[in-house]
Every structure is written in C-alpha cells, then in structure tokens.
C-alpha cells in the first residue's frame, strides 16, 4: 500500500494527430502544453515531426538538440537523456531534428517498430512527476504517427474550420480504429478541437456545426479563433501565451486546457 503511494502516478499521454498539415497540431501542442504547465500540471511535449516546429517554437536552437526523438526511437538513448527544459516552468520537450525522417526507413524491418515510443515511455517511468505528455505528430499516418498512437492513452484531433475538414477526418478516425483494433486497444479519442475559426467567415460556422452534428460531444466547446498573434509567436521562439497572454488565441488555449482537465477528470472518475 505504502509503496503504491510512493510510486509516481503515470502521466496521461495524449497524441495530437491529424494527417493534414497546417491544421494547428504544433500550435496546440505548444500552447496547450504551456497552459497546462501554468495551472500546475507539469507537461512534456515530444516532438515527433522531423520539421521540428514544436522545438523551434519553444526556442530550442538546433545546436542544443543533441539527443532527440530520433535517438529515442532508434533505441540509441533513453528518453530521460533527450528531455530539455523550456523557458516555461513546468514545460519540457524532447526535441526533434530532420534526422527523424530516417527513422521511418530504418525501422521498416524491425518487428517492434510500432512500439518504440511506448517502450521508451515505459522505461522513462515518471521522472519529473509529469501530469501530461503531449506528442506532436507529423502530417502523415506514418510509422511516426503510429508510434505516437500506440504510446498514447488518448488522441486529441485539431480540425481546421474549412470545407474539407470532415473528409480528412474520416481517414484519421479509421486509422485510430485500426490502432484500437490491434496495436493499442485502450486508445480513446479525448476530443476534437476546432481551430482557426474565423467569425467573419460563414463557412467557419457551417463547418463547426457540421462537425458537431457528426461528432457530438467529442468536440470541445472551446473553439480556437484564427488570430495573427498566434502565428507570430513561433518566430520569437515563444508560446503565444507568453508572447501575448491577452490575445484571443491565448485566452482560448487557456480555456481549452481547463476544459480538457475537466474532461480528463470525468474520464478518470468513470
Ligand atoms: P500543423 O502542426 O498541424 O502543421 P501548425 O500548428 O504548425 O499546424 O499551424 C500551421 C500554421 O498556422 C502555422 O504558421 C501557425 O502559426 C498558424 N496557426 C495555427 N493556429 C493558428 C490560429 N489559431 N490563428 C492563426 N494562425 C494559426
Ligand atoms: Mg506541426
């Protein structure tokens, strides 16, 4: 009993996935991570995109990315060696570099290729007493994304409020179903985030209504507005929440973090 109490609670692992590029995955990883850390939920972002946008957006210079998500997947380094602090207290990151494009090919013949990240996280345990791990995925349904889905407890799906949003979503939901049917039966869909909502554009409203009609309460109440301050922040190596806390985009991510924590509590209580 006492031993159980002493054991650090496992962090909740969320994969941020959508095979479409430019829908707000990385922006969500950075700003949701920052918002969670700010309310006392220590969070680790794993950058699993060879583009390394999450690493850059959090101000990690390339020269400092010595041990990366590539090394972790290849089994060349334990996860603990790859974790870097960020300027945000309570927020850390496993960075990535373009090396990660090689992982795909190098892992093809390996029997455990889909389980590399899950294994690495299991070995990591919970150093740093994390509440959340957010995995930022590349815009594809590659081995990298599958590794993330296999390692995760639940998926979070950013969806851009545009005409073809639902079309891409069905492919993603199919992939999540496949993973649930085999590699990771416990994978849930934590929620769908409507991003880049433009209130001057009627289409945004229509897409939001459509998505809610299809997916009901899987869709978060909080909608992330299109906000230029959000797109400016990464070039300063800062989360939008630090670059401009008051802007509507930052405020939306703070609200989203609150909603997510609420949702997590009700999942845990169920
Ligand atoms: P993904 O990781 O899915 O490819 P990003 O998070 O990198 O998408 O977002 C794509 C681009 O859109 C980036 O330039 C980002 O700064 C910008 N962006 C993301 N969310 C918003 C938003 N709510 N308002 C304005 N620009 C945004
Ligand atoms: Mg990205």
Image (spheres, helix red, strand yellow):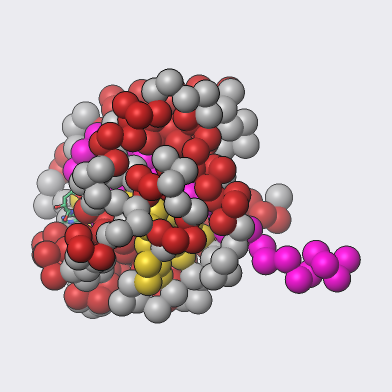
Front residue of 243/98: it is 98
Give the quadrant of the N terminus: bottom right
- Picture coordinates of residue 160, whole percent (x, y): 24, 42
- Picture coordinates of residue 211, whole percent (x, y): 35, 36
Task: Establish if 64 lies above or below 27.
Answer: below
Q: Is residue 19 inside the magenta stretch?
A: yes
Range of magenta residues: 1-28
Left of 46 or right of it: where is 52? left
Task: Establish if 71 lies above or below 203.
Answer: below
Question: Is residue 94 visible to us here?
Answer: yes
The image quadrant of residue 90 is: bottom left
- Picture coordinates of residue 78, whole percent (x, y): 49, 54
Q: Is residue 121 inside the magenta stretch?
A: no
Task: Establish if 72 lies above or below 84.
Answer: above
The image quadrant of residue 175 is: top left
Left of 238 or right of it: where is 219? right
- Picture coordinates of residue 181, whole percent (x, y): 58, 23
Seen at 36% across and 23% down, the residue is 171
Front residue of 230/123: it is 123
Seen at 15% across and 43% down, the residue is 202
Seen at 35% across and 45% down, the residue is 70
* Residue ranking furthest to the front: 76
Question: Is residue 208 visible to us here?
Answer: no
Front residue of 108/236: it is 108
């Amino acid at each position: 009993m006492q031993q159980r109490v002493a054991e650090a609670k496992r962090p909740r692992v969320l994969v941020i996935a959508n095979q479409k590029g430019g829908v707000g995955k990385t922006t969500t990883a950075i700003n949701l991570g920052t918002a969670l850390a700010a309310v006392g939920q220590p969070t680790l972002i794993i950058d699993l995109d060879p583009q390394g946008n999450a690493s850059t957006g959090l101000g990690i210079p390339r020269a400092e990315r010595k041990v990366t998500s590539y090394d972790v997947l290849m089994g060349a380094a334990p996860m603990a060696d790859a974790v870097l602090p960020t300027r945000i207290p309570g927020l850390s990151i496993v960075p990535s570099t373009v090396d990660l494009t090689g992982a795909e090919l190098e892992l093809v013949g390996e029997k455990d290729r889909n389980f590399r990240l899950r294994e690495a996280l299991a070995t990591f345990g919970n150093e740093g007493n994390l509440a959340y791990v957010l995995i930022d995925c590349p815009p594809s349904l590659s081995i990298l994304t599958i590794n993330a889905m296999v390692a995760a407890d639940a998926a979070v799906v950013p969806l851009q409020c545009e005409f073809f949003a639902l079309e891409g979503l069905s492919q993603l939901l199919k992939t999540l179903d496949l993973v649930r049917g085999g590699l990771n039966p416990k994978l849930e869909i934590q929620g769908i985030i409507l991003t880049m909502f433009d209130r001057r554009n009627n289409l945004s409203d229509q897409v939001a209504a459509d998505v809610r009609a299809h997916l009901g309460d899987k869709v978060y109440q909080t909608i992330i507005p299109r906000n230029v301050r959000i797109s400016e922040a990464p070039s300063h190596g800062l989360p939008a929440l630090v670059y401009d806390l008051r802007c509507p985009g930052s405020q939306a991510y703070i609200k989203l973090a609150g909603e997510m924590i609420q949702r997590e509590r009700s999942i845990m209580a169920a």
